[in-house]
Amino acid sequence: KLLDAMLAAIGLNRQQGVYITNVVKSHPPQNRDPSAREIAACRPWLDAQITLVRPAVILAVGRVATQSLTGSKARMGELRGRWHAFGEADIPLLATYHPAYLLREPPAKAKVWDDLLVLKRFLREADA
């Protein structure tokens, strides 16, 4: 719900072409982070989804998604708020904090808001 609210704050919703997916296709037990093996096992499906959807931009939400999609092991604080390129198509990818993190660390909401404004500006310029 928080992710939907975050997107709505910049004028986006799932009915307008926002597609949401996970790097793994089932939640690991006890809500733990997926292992590298689990991520690798699901990667062909994720890559196929991205190929089919053909996104203009990817918003990587959280450390697991960001590290998986960028191939970086850097901390989220170093990855968020800046542009990366995904895959052979060099799809623009912007990383931000996960809504679950924001529930634990409310001050981080300001940083996510800044990230969402960067995304909104990118989409506006892409439409122009």
Image: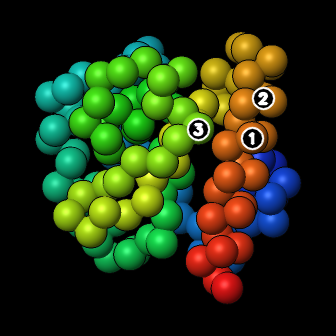
- Between 20 and 65, the residue placed more toward the observer is 65
Residue 81 numbered mark, or none: 3
Q: Is residue 71 above or below residue 90?
A: above
| Residue under the point 75% across and 52% down | 117
Residue annotated with mark 2: 109
Q: Which image quadrant for residue 122?
A: bottom right
Visible residue check, residue 89 = yes
Q: Which image quadrant for residue 100?
A: top right
Q: Is mark 1 on a helix, strand or loop?
A: helix
- Between 16 and 70, the residue placed more toward the observer is 70
Q: In this view, does 47 lie above or below 55?
A: above
What's the coloring here?
rainbow
| Residue under the point 64% across and 21% down | 101
Residue annotated with mark 1: 114
Disc 3 and disc 1 in contact, CB within 8 angstroms: yes
Q: First in sequence: mark 3 or mark 2? A: 3
